Image: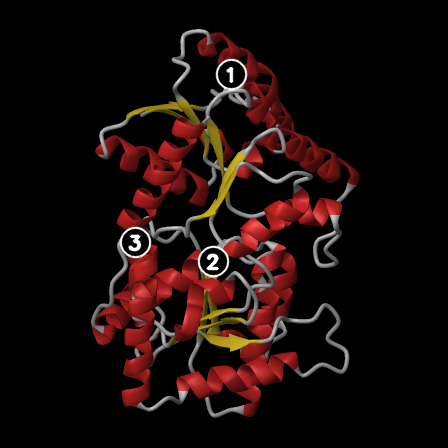
Amino acid sequence: MNIIFFTHPRFLGHQSMPRFANMLVNGMKKKGHQVEVWTPKPNFHKLPATETLKKWLGYIDQFIVFPIVVKQRLKSVDKNTLFVFTDNALGPWVPLVSNRNHVIHCHDFLAQRSAFEGIDENLTGFTGKLYQKIIKKGYTKGNNFISVSKKTQSDLHKLLNFTPAVSEVVYNAMNRDFAPQKIDDTRIKVAKETGIAFLDGYILHVGGNQWYKNRIGVVEIYNELRTHFNITKPLLLVGTEPNNELLNLIVSSPFQKDIHSLSECSDEMVKNLYSGASLLLFPSLDEGFGWPIAEAMASGCLVVTTNEPPMTEVGGQAGFYIPKRPLNLNNSNWALESAGIVNDVLSLNPITHKKNVLQGIENVERFKQKKMLEAVEEIYSKIITTE
């Protein structure tokens, strides 16, 4: 096959999307397909400007300059070429090739649902709604979709006003190698790297400050865990530096000296952090997939996450589940109830703990790269054959 991948421009500084795109690009190359990558160049974005202005200059590169470039390049592209959009957020470019072989990879529709359905935890302003409307107008011109979870596929179908020719689910594959390590060794490595004593274990959370990651809920659960149960393990927040709201909650916690945050961790450090953790606490309100769940399980780490899809899709029978955090906590014992479940997991006897670790490792066999790439390749071939 001849495949052209549309990807987010590098100047946006994304992390997970470039990894996903690289996995597809490199995977299809290894399978012998002819591959190109089309992405906007920073013609305007590279100009000296404030961060706010750079954002708008980046829009010029993406939505004015790049479409002109694409139209010129299309004149010399074979008609049997497959155009692959590595993210549904690239919707504005879909109309450029909607009359050719194409497919759109869909990761999540959280921003779309916030704009059009209204999510109380993430109210969208006028410009945000306008931007999401442009994205939707674009991807709805497409007719072939691959979603990373059944939850994402369900959201897609609600947003489309037609039945697509192709709508398949292919679960994400882990784009880094995660595997269990000797817990004591990794904890020593983590302690040396951070200067923090984690030798007796720690509760881990991996994620950013996005509203749906529910980092506030992580600290709320930790406060209740320390208050009501005989647990003294520290909490480690890995990812983006805490925003002001989260930082204020940490500072006001009676256990603030045991709450730590790490950012800009290397891949090797992240692997060590998963392997050395007592458990991963991942109480997300929503996700497109939920990478940390699979990564933790592959590392031999138990996972406590939200009893909602797609977290339940990824965690399967190997996960431990808590209720979704309500918007209004008045008269709610959500944090205490969740802390009780975390305490139960931390208190598992060695035999049960090992059994659940092995169950998690078996569960994530579903998310191997080889399996994902084979499924994607089959769908790509079907689209070219039928269109």
Q: Amino acid at mark 1?
A: Asn
- In the displayed structure, 22 sits above or below 209; it is above
**Nearer the observer, 269 or 111:** 111
Quadrant (top left/top right/bottom left/bottom right) for the N terminus: top left
For marks 1 and 3, the one nearer the N-term is 1
Q: Is residue 273 visible?
A: no
Residue at 76% across, 82% down: 331
Element under disc 1: loop
- Name the quadrant containing residue 349: bottom left
Other residues around mark 1 within 10 Å, as few (<14) / some (14–19) / many (≥20): some
The picture places residue 354, in percent across and down from the top left corner, at 28, 81
The picture places residue 85, in percent across and down from the top left corner, at 48, 32
Look at mark 3 in the image and give the residue it sits on.
368
**Nearer the observer, 374 or 353:** 374
Residue at 39% across, 19% down: 80
- In the displayed structure, 318 sits above or below 291; it is below
Residue at 29% across, 66% down: 299
Marks 2,3: beta carbons within 8 A: no
The answer to whether 371 appears left or right of 129 in the picture is left
- In the displayed structure, 33 sits above or below 120; it is above
For marks 2 and 1, the one nearer the N-term is 1
Other residues around mark 3 within 10 Å, as few (<14) / some (14–19) / many (≥20): some
Cα distance in 3D space between marks 2 and 3? 15 Å
- In the displayed structure, 42 sits above or below 284; it is above
For marks 2 and 3, the one nearer the N-term is 2
Residue at 39% across, 28% down: 385
The answer to whether 383 appears left or right of 244 in the picture is left
Look at mark 2 in the image and give the residue it sits on.
290
Mark 2 or mark 1, which is nearer to you?
2
Tag on residue 43? 1
Cα distance in 3D space between marks 1 and 3? 38 Å
Other residues around mark 2 within 10 Å, as few (<14) / some (14–19) / many (≥20): many
